[in-house]
């Protein structure tokens, strides 16, 4: 999926809900440091919306980590173009 960390992002809420907070923290660090949506890439809108955008928003809703919200806003803005 173009280096977008699809499975990792899609799994963030599961890590949180399972109480795997150390793993969640490591995953969020990767998202914050490496996930970059500024790429010229054709993506499936539906899959990207539910797995990437939904994953980021769900993880933000659970953890209140601002970096996740900022990534979700960035992706949402790009999907609307």
Image (spheres, grey):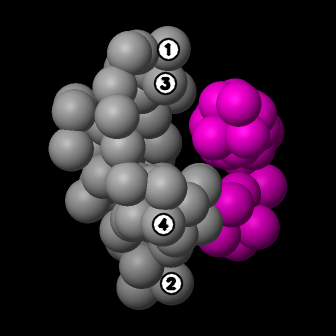
Asked which secondary structure carries label 2, the reply is helix
C-alpha distance separating marks 2 and 1: 30 Å
Work out whether mark 4 precedes mark 2 in sequence or the reverse, and give the earlier one: 2
Viewer-nearest residue: 66 or 44: 44
Q: Which mark is residue 38?
A: 1
- Res 60 → quadrant: bottom right
How many C-alpha atoms fall within 10 Å of the one at disc 3: few (<14), some, or many (≥20)?
some
Q: Main secondary structure of the magenta part?
A: helix
In three-dimensional space, the C-alpha distance between marks 3 and 1, rounded to whole angstroms, equals 4 Å
Front residue of 37 and 81: 81
At mark 3, the secondary structure is loop
Q: Which residues are magenta?
A: 57-81
Circles 4 and 2, Cβ within 8 Å, touching? The answer is no
- Callout 2: 10 Å neighbours few (<14), some, many (20+)? few
User: Residue 75 at what x, y percent from top left?
Assistant: 62, 37
Percent coordinates x, y for residue 37 in the rendering: 49, 24
Residue that carries the numbered disc 4 in the rendered image = 46
Rendering quarter of residue 81:
top right
C-alpha span from label 4 to label 1: 19 Å
- Quarter of the image with the N terminus is top left
* Label 3 with label 1: CB-CB less than 8 Å: yes
Q: Earlier in the sequence, mark 2 or mark 1?
A: 2
Task: Indicate which label's residue lies in the foreground, 4 or 2.
Answer: 4
Disc 1, SS:
loop
Residue annotated with mark 2: 17
Up-down relation of residue 46 to residue 67 (above or below): below
Residue located beneath label 3 in the image: 37
- Mark before the other along the chain sequence, 3 or 4: 3
């Amino acid at each position: 999926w173009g280096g977008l960390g699809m499975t990792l992002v899609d799994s963030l809420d599961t890590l949180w809900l399972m109480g795997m907070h150390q793993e969640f923290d490591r995953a969020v660090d990767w998202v914050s440091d490496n996930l970059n949506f500024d790429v010229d890439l054709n993506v499936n809108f539906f899959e990207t919306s539910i797995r990437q955008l939904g994953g980021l928003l769900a993880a933000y809703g659970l953890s209140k980590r601002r970096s996740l919200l900022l990534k979700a806003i960035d992706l949402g803005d790009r999907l609307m173009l």
